[in-house]
Amino acid sequence: MVWIAGMAANTTSGGGETDVCAYYGTGTPPSAGSTTPTGTVAGLMQHVVLVSNTSQSGFTIMDKLTGLAINTTYWFDVMISSPQGGGAYIKDVQGVALEV
């Protein structure tokens, strides 16, 4: 099981949408700021619509991951984007991975 939560915001004038998606994989993780999704999607993309450039909203992504190999190192990543073309960011991010 994996849970990733935090606050989403967008500095675009009048607010805007911030999309948050989680990925995981093995091997080399994506570099910070990469705009190309890498790995396997975990959970569902969260579409956070904000009414002003000072608004914030919480998000949570969760998923039950199956088929993971024992004794293998995995990385987890969060990718953010904005259909308006910029200003999207997340903060106060927390993550939990639990073997069940």
Image (spheres, grey):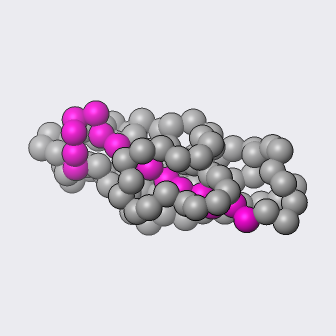
Determine if the magenta segment contains residue 49: no
Residue 56 seen: no
Q: Position of residue 49 (x, y in %)?
A: 33, 36
Query: What residue is at 42 percent from the left and 36 percent from the top?
Result: 47
Q: Residue furthest front?
A: 27
Q: Residue furthest left?
A: 13
Query: Camera-side residue: 17 or 21?
Result: 21
Query: What residue is at 22 percent from the left and 35 percent from the top?
Result: 84
Query: Camera-side residue: 61 or 69?
Result: 69
Residue 85 is left or right of residue 5, and the answer is: left
Residue range corresponding to the magenta coloring: 73-87
Residue 71 is left or right of residue 52, and the answer is: right
Determine if the magenta segment contains residue 74: yes
Q: Quadrant of residue 14?
A: top left
Q: Position of residue 20 (x, y in %)?
A: 44, 45
Q: Position of residue 8 (x, y in %)?
A: 37, 51
> Quadrant of the image for the C terminus?
bottom right
Q: Across the whole image, how many numbered discs are drawn on residues?
A: 0
Residue 69 seen: yes
Query: What residue is at 40 percent from the left and 62 percent from the top?
Result: 32
Q: Position of residue 53 (x, y in %)?
A: 19, 49
Residue 33 is left or right of residue 98, and the answer is: left
Query: What residue is at 53 percent from the left and 56 percent from the top?
Result: 77
